[in-house]
Amino acid sequence: MVGFLEWLLSCQQALVKWLNSFHGPETGYVADFVGAIPEGVFVFLAIVIPVLVVGLGIQAVAGISTFVERKVAAKIQLRLGPMECNVGSFVGAFARAFCEKAAKPGASMGARALALVLGPLIPLLDALDKIVTKRVPGLPIFAADGLKLIMKEDIIPAAADNWLFRAAPTIVLASAFAALACLPYSDRFYVADFNIGIFYLAAVTSLEVMGILMAGWASNNKWSLLGGMRSAAQITSYEIPAGLTILTAMIVSGTMSMQGLTVSQLGVDNWQLGWAWNWYAFSNPLMTILVPIYFLAALAECNRTPFDIPEAESELVSGYHTEYSGMRFALFFMAEYAMMFVTSAIAVTIFFGGWSTGIGVLERAMIDGQPTYDSVGQVTAVHFHWWGSLIHLLAFLVKTYLVVLIMIWVRWAVPRFRPDQMMALCWKRLMPIGMVAFLGASAWLLIRGGLTGGSAEKSLQISQATGVLSLFVFLAVLGGIWIWWKKPAQ
Amino acid sequence: MSAEGILFWVVFLFTASSAALVATTRNILHAAFALGLTFLGVSGIYLFLHADFVAAVQLIVYVGGIVVLIMFGIMFSSHSMESPGEEPRSKFSLMAGGLAALGIFAVLVLLIRALQVPLSDQNSAFDAIYQRTVAVAPGQKGLGHYLLGEYLLPFEVVSILILGALAGAISLIRKETTTE
């Protein structure tokens, strides 16, 4: 994260100065101790803290996604979904019973100490219930499900390949989590910004195929093997349209880094800073065509319906994760939701502007200082206030979660494809469209180079012209949607 | 021992032990998966050589493509269903294998010393190429500049090779299914 290490070091200096300002011997010792902490500790913290925050955050997001999925499914199927679970029923009841027992005369010291800790929790849990669970009934079910899965017996079939069986969920989860290191959560709060950001994402999402094959084989189960092979074939096939989309985004923006992709959609150089029609999905017709293609490829990579032949519940029981129980199954499950989040985040970054809010006035109000330019005159970074960075973080998470919601919605609305239909879709329809878009983007790059002839003002004029054109197209599309919405039923 | 040094040893030990597993394990599918882990480790070693683009390409092509293909080949053939080979390893074969490995290792060490590749960043031949590429633009922009500029002919020859492989694969498959 940019500047996190410097910020930590400045915190250390500030703490030393504050402690020294008391001019006392005790605070002097503490100040010396704090000042003597080696820099390596702060380097370690600067690396570990963002990783932990993101890792724990995705677990919470994946957990709540399971709850959201069940509620969305219920809404589509005209029922209610999880309603019964509340915090008071499993933690609160346990705490109450424990405190009652510990209040009896024969209780041990340890029990009394634990009751001292649990006792004040009870009104807190009741408040949590009143505030959260009454409004969103059944929300704690994701935590209850997690606890249940941890407590389940870990069954490994006797004839299963021991090491491969244990290693498979780890690899699938590791590839999903490794992709989180690179996402542009905000302009200031991110884990790392690689030079090869998008390319690295394509690379680590291709690692999960190995884990799925491992799982299918190691279960020693013909149906698991079949599910695993189908899933591997599906994922490797759909990597091609996804990769072509990512390549087109690289060509259009001229950079692979995720922050660079987002900054190039801010439109700094053509006076349109921050407005939503600058996003590639709205301003570049090739990218507009690619939005549904990438969305379908993302659904296929996550093994989501309509591409969930590998997990087809009515056909293969559970495909390659049939034999997994308890926490191992939870790892596969979490990997699926983490992959949904990651692919949604990629879609948001390349099509919908990453962390930008889409409201130009707001963006312009949050700018702090001048943008940084590189040697060619292109903008590499725009600086915002710290509260602007927080708003950007919120915008990124909201946009990504909207795409995740669409993925969940599609699952419960559409029946699944046959394997041959799925393969035909990929190779005969999505890949040619992706190639045409890729060629079109390269051609536009050449044409634009020829038009500008290398001069900077001409390039600026072309950017402004295409910017105005994209504004009109955006308004026309909005107008078309409005007319279609309002037209009387025939 | 700097943090980078420790990391390098971790990655190296991971790669070397996976490679040893590939060669010594009796179960062929274990060998295939260990090969995948070896390629993962090699990708890490590429990162230490400042070749981040090549590391990502290694992951996509080798781990996500070649190892998956090897696994498909093993799983579809009948040999994977048999139990792993039961023949005992004779002392003679162990000694012969060990001598051969030592011999190749010695040859490699002598070759590298003869090329005088020093362990630091200031290497004359490779450093010149690296500096020249970085001078154009850092990272993969410089790579693209040279791939489509000075080294265009090898680039196109490689793409013709890949096209030939694609055509060959398709013709093989067509022969198998239309055998009338």
Image (cartoon, grey):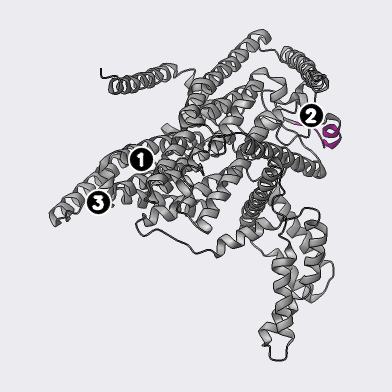
- Relative depth, front residue between A431 and B2: A431
- Relative depth, front residue between A258 and A61: A61
The magenta region covers A362-371
Q: Is residue A155 magenta?
A: no
**Tag on residue B84?**
3
Please give left or right for residue A460 compared with residue B128 in the image: right
Q: Residue at x 80, y 57 (%)?
A: A134
Please give left or right for residue A158 compared with residue A244 in the image: left
On the image, the x and y values in percent for residue A374 come to 68, 28
- Relative depth, front residue between A145 and A18: A145
Residue tagged 1 = B71
The residue positioned farthest toward the left in the image shown: B92
Mark in the foreground, 3 or 2: 3
The amino acid at mark 1 is: Met
Q: Quadrant of residue B92?
A: bottom left
Q: Residue at x 33, y 49 (%)?
A: B30
- For label 2, the crowd category at 10 Å Cα-Cα, with few meaning under 14, some 14 to 19 and many 20 or more, is many
Q: Residue at x 33, y 41 (%)?
A: B75
Whole-angstrom CA distance, mark 2 to mark 1, is 48 Å
Q: Do marks 3 and 1 share a subunit? A: yes
Chain of the residue on which disc 3 is drawn: B
The amino acid at mark 3 is: Pro
The amino acid at mark 2 is: Gly
Q: Is residue A367 magenta?
A: yes
Whole-angstrom CA distance, mark 3 to mark 1, is 16 Å
Element on which disc 3 rests: loop
Does the rendering let one see residue A441? yes
Element on which disc 2 rests: loop
